[in-house]
Every structure is written in C-alpha cells, then in structure tokens.
Image (spheres, rainbow, N blue to C red):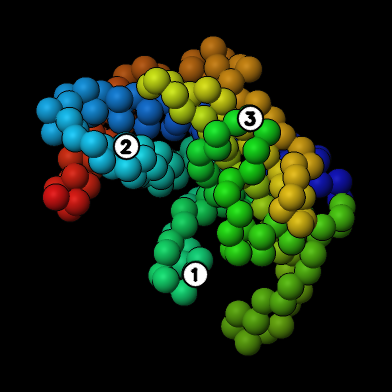
Amino acid sequence: MDIKKLFEDNFDFAFKAATYNNMRVAIQTFEQFKKKNEDFFSFDKRETLFGHLRTYAIEKQFNDSAFNPKANYSVSMKQVNNYKHKALCIETNDFIVNIGRTNNEHKLLPVSSYKEEFAKANAGLSMQLSFDFMNNVPKVVESKKYAEITYGYRYGDMTHLYIVLPSSDYKGIEHSTNLLEDIKIYENYVPEDLVEESIVSLKKSLSKEIEKII
C-alpha cells in the first residue's frame, strides 16, 4: 500500500480542520489565561511554566475533543520510558500521532526512543505485520504507521502547523502537509460559539493545573 495515500486517507479535511481548531482553542486559551494572570507570572522562571501550561492546554484540548461524536480519532496516554513519562498518542485507523513544538518548519520532534520505535513502522511502502493474541486466538494485524503534528509558537501565535511523516530511521521527513495554508476554510468548520465554549472549559482546566503546581 502506498504510504502517502494512506497518509492522505487518514489525515483528511475533517482531521486537518479538527487539528487546526484544537490548536486555535488551546493557544487562545493559553494567551488569555496568561494575560489574566500576568501578576502571577512576573518572575524569571515563567518561561518554563509557560511551556508546561501551553503543552497542557494543547493536549487537554485534543483529549477533550476526541470525545466529540464526530471525532475521527481517539486518544490515549502511553507510558513511553522507565521514568513513567506518558505521552499523548492520537490514533486514527492506520496511524499513531504525537504532537509537539518545533523551532522551525519541516522539523521532527526531538529524538526519543519511543518515537524512533514508532517510526520503524514507516519502513517501505507495505504495512508491517504484528500478532494479536486477544481472546487467545492468534491473528495477524497491521502495525500502525507513525506521524507527528508539529507546531511553532512565537509572540502569542502559531508560526507553523504541519502533519509530518517521519522516515523509518527518524532522520528525515517522507511526506508532510501544511495546515496553515487553508485556515479560513478550517475556521468555518467549527461554529464560533463552540470555540468559545471550549476556551471557557479549557481555562478552568488550566486554573486547576496551576493549583497542582503551586
């Protein structure tokens, strides 16, 4: 099977629109929250805290939106190392997807063992096979391919937003799509009142996250 066709089939208009709007909600929520609490954030270590809260807002928004009946993806938290670190994994029919910030366009997320392991499934054009022993019945199943949602952030806005397909050795990008090319179309995909509702809900979650930290 052509992996690029598989890429386009999984990351169709609905997925791209949902991804863009999730990012829009998360970034707007973070910026409004930061402005409202600027006195609290007036200390030298705020950048570290900002990074944590921005990541939290993005992952929480993707998690919450996955429960929308129209969502064409699911989410799970997977433990990815011996230090019990968990990564948000977005799953479509054929892909596992991680999301994170990159300093420049056309960059993969920082290297880690679990990402390299996921990317091995992208080898060649044919699907790798694994065995599923659920219900004690051996069955050959197709391993999911690996993709990443990468974004840039500067001065309160996104500088880039891509879905990228890493090479199997995790040293390059085999295929990518730029989500900021069609933002006007994507913005119309989600009614503005639902966007506002999501922002209000996410602000409450950020407040609770701050309470845990302090």
Separation (CA) of disc 1 from disc 2: 25 Å
Residue 204 seen in this snapshot: no
Residue 42: x and y in percent read: 17, 30
N-term-proximal mark, 3 vs 1: 1
Comparing 189 with 31, the one in front is 31
Q: Which residue is mark 2?
A: 47
Separation (CA) of disc 3 from disc 1: 27 Å
Q: Which mark is residue 19?
A: none
Left or right, 169 with reference to 84? right
Which is closer to the viewer, label 1 or label 2?
2
Mark 3 neighbour density, 10 Å: few (under 14) some (14–19) many (20 or more) = some
Residue 2: x and y in percent read: 86, 46
Mark 2 neighbour density, 10 Å: few (under 14) some (14–19) many (20 or more) = few
Q: Amino acid at mark 2?
A: Glu
Give above or below for 160 relative to 127: above
Quarter residue 52 falls in: top left
N-term-proximal mark, 1 vs 2: 2
Count the marks: how many?
3
Q: Which residue is mark 3?
A: 105
Q: Which residue is mark 1?
A: 81
Give above or below for 76 relative to 193: below
Q: Amino acid at mark 1?
A: Asn
**Mark 3 and mark 1 residues within 8 Å of each other at the beta carbon:** no
Report the residue at 75% width, 42% height from top: 173
Judging from the image, what secondary structure is the residue with disc 3 in? loop
Residue 182: x and y in percent read: 61, 17
Report the residue at 79% width, 64% height from top: 128
Residue 70: x and y in percent read: 49, 38
Comparing 56 with 52, the one in front is 52
Judging from the image, what secondary structure is the residue with disc 2 in? helix
Mark 1 neighbour density, 10 Å: few (under 14) some (14–19) many (20 or more) = few
Left or right, 101 with reference to 9? left
